[in-house]
Image (tube, grey):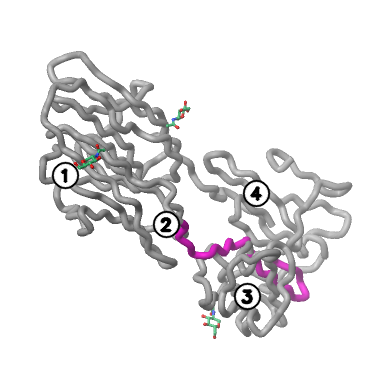
Amino acid sequence: KCMTHGIFFLFPMLCSLSAGVCVGSELSFLQQPSDVIAVRDRALMLDCQVQGEEPIMVTWRRNGVPLPVSPRVRVLQNGTLLIQNFQKRREGSDGDIGEYDCSAQNRFGLLVSRRARVYLASLPKFHTHPVSMNVNEGGVARFQCQINGVPEAQISWEKDRVLLDTQDSRYTLLPMGVLQVTGVRQVDAGVFRCVAANIANTRYSHEASLNVTGESYKEPVILSGPQNLTLTVHQTAILECIATGNPRPIVSWSRLDGRSIGVEGIQVLGTGNLMISDVSLQHSGVYVCAANRPGTRMRRTALGRLVVQAPPEFLQWPQSVSKPAGGSAVFTCVAQGVPEPHLIWLKNGKVLMPGHNIKLTNNNR
Ligand SMILES: *[C@@H]1O[C@H](CO)[C@@H](O)[C@H](O)[C@H]1NC(C)=O
Ligand SMILES: *[C@@H]1O[C@H](CO)[C@@H](O)[C@H](O)[C@H]1NC(C)=O
Ligand SMILES: *[C@@H]1O[C@H](CO)[C@@H](O)[C@H](O)[C@H]1NC(C)=O
């Protein structure tokens, strides 16, 4: 059995150790527990469905320790773990939060599932509140609020305690709780705050005022440039760039290595934010946002690095074999991913260490 980063390939090695013939009696998972967010005081079920020769015994562990069975926490007939009234972390105890795995055993061997992380839904206080700004007429305003919700909070904005109309093209909402207002006018003056909501709670940020002042000449300035981002293939990258100045600067994007950004899946959000849909490994690189004063060479730049990762994927996995006693058996497992996956071998649910009759080669060390 071999696994990479939480994706397990399941394989009872017992067949290689007895000289018997393998029939359809090997254990395999039909369904393994997956990562989940639990809500306090509600019930949580984690599935574990196995096939193989009966009788099969399913047991559960939390953080590697067998779960004590109680009326509140029990294993159902079909292998599912039921936790009633999910408990939060308390002094001296983790409550029900942790990493869960299930094990299935029959007379042929023992199989351990992937580890499922169980989180508790929460919405702690804002750690970044919007800050008041004075903006020239025609300039840009930017507010940001940040909060660490589990699951991630939905963020909306209010102006003077009324939900902001985000259909207005001068307002751009970006991930990370950013609100951009471009082409600021007198009517935009007011008090802004954000509202964060998830299944655990709803919270309001402090208020920030936007004061609009008269027009005047201003050199271009990048109010906020792109952040370094690490994403997984197929996700969407949003690189922020908002520039202000009078006359309004022209924002453009390039790659530091000189390669073309291309056009497919590329969009501009608001006045200068770059959106790349369905990122692939080729999109990794350093991106440069430039703000030019129209008709001049005067410019400001800001850089951000985009790193695209690919989850591990098996190219080849171990096959069941029958061998006479005294012979040797070779199991092969090949996986790819960025960064390169680390492979671990398990036998009957236990990590396999190189020993007197076991050798691991290549990156299995
Ligand atoms: C197991 O049984 C419970 C209770 O009967 C049910 O709610 C759950 O969906 C079942 N799980 C699977 C994987 O069939
Ligand atoms: C904006 O204007 C209000 C009222 O005129 C004033 O109280 C506030 O201090 C100003 N904000 C900033 C950031 O200057
Ligand atoms: C982005 O990463 C580069 C190094 O790759 C670092 O020099 C720079 O400070 C980072 N920028 C931010 C905004 O964290």
**Viewport quadrant of the C terminus:** top right
The three-letter amino acid code for the residue at tag 2 is Glu
Q: Secondary structure at mark 1?
A: loop
Could you tell which of marks 1 and 2 lies nearer the N-terminus? Answer: 2
Could you tell which of marks 1 and 3 lies nearer the N-terminus? Answer: 3
Q: Secondary structure at mark 3?
A: strand
The three-letter amino acid code for the residue at tag 4 is Cys
Could you tell which of marks 2 and 3 lies nearer the N-terminus? Answer: 3
- Asked if the beta carbon under badge 2 is closer than 8 A to the nearest atom of ligand 3, the reply is no
Q: Residue at x 23, y 58 (%)?
A: 161
Could you tell which of marks 4 and 1 lies nearer the N-terminus? Answer: 1
Q: Which residue is mark 4?
A: 333
Q: Secondary structure at mark 2?
A: loop
Residue 9, how many percent across, how many down?
Answer: 62, 58
Segment tinted magenta in the rendering? 100-124
Q: Which residue is mark 2?
A: 152
Query: What numbered label is drawn on residue 51?
Result: 3
Q: Residue at x 31, y 53 (%)?
A: 194
Q: CA distance from mark 2 to mark 3?
A: 36 Å
Give the image quarter of residue 222. top left
Q: Main secondary structure of the magenta part?
A: strand
Q: Are marks 4 and 1 in contact (CB under 8 Å)?
A: no
Q: Secondary structure at mark 4?
A: loop
The three-letter amino acid code for the residue at tag 3 is Gln
Q: Residue at x 42, y 35 (%)?
A: 228
Residue 86, how many percent across, how many down?
Answer: 57, 74
Q: CA distance from mark 1 to mark 2?
A: 30 Å
Q: Viewer-proximal residue, 267 or 323?
A: 267
